[in-house]
Image: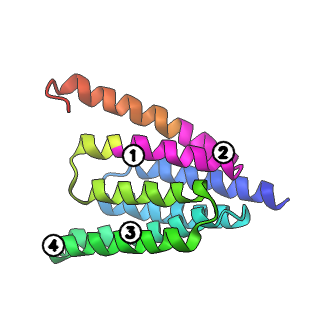
């Protein structure tokens, strides 16, 4: 029964993340992502997927920080990015269970580096790669909702990258 509840919560989290990308401003997008991450934290907790829980907990703080960063330019200092990376490294050590348990935290580190000051195509490429890391992890922890959301996200991001490539002949 707990497994079914976990999957339902995971699918609701996925819906919030889908809705997020249809919002008009960054604050609302990140607000929806915070809700999605809270639900995913519960999802992974119910699956006893500790590394996923830790990653989603840190994602809540990351998204909130990005909202604050938009309001306060001083928070764009590279020292904050370095602090986030240090926290992710410590969390990886703390959450380590096996080699697959590092995948979510590795994905989170790659993602924050790219969103910090990255351009649109770099962010999409990073997200594309990170979805594959999450897909492997979700298969490992038997997260059906995670697998479905990752496959859809991989396809969607791939299409978005192709669309950027078509519009930009100087594609990297």
Which region is colored magenta? 126-151
Secondary structure under tag 4 reads: helix
Q: Earlier in the sequence, mark 2 or mark 4?
A: 4
Q: Which residue is mark 1?
A: 127
- Using the rendered view, name the quadrant where residue 28 is placed: bottom left
Task: Indicate whether 115 appears above or below 129.
Answer: below
Look at discs 3 and 2 and give the one toward the viewer.
2
- Using the rendered view, name the quadrant where residue 72 is placed: bottom left
Q: Horizontally, is 90 left or right of 96 in the view?
A: left
Residue nearest the observer in this picture, 81 or 56: 81
Q: Is residue 38 magenta?
A: no
Q: Quadrant of the N terminus?
A: bottom right
For marks 3 and 2, give the CA distance: 25 Å
Where is residue 121? Give x, y as percent: 26, 40
- Using the rendered view, name the quadrant where residue 69 is placed: bottom left
Q: Which residue is mark 3?
A: 62
């Amino acid at each position: 029964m707990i497994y079914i509840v976990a999957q339902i919560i995971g699918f609701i989290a996925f819906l919030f993340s889908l809705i997020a990308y249809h919002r008009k401003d960054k604050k609302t997008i990140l607000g929806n992502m915070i809700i999605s991450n809270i639900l995913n934290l519960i999802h992974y907790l119910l699956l006893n997927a500790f590394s996923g829980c830790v990653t989603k907990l840190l994602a809540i703080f990351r998204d909130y920080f990005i909202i604050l960063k938009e309001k306060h330019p001083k928070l764009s200092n590279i020292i904050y990015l370095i602090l986030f990376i240090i926290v992710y490294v410590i969390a990886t050590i703390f959450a380590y269970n096996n080699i697959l348990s590092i995948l979510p935290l590795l994905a989170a580190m790659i993602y924050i580096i790219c969103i910090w000051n990255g351009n649109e195509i770099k962010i999409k490429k990073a997200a594309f790669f990170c979805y594959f890391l999450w897909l492997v992890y979700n298969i490992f922890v038997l997260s059906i909702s995670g697998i479905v959301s990752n496959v859809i996200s991989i396809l969607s991001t791939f299409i978005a990258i192709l669309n950027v490539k078509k519009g930009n002949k100087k594609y990297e």
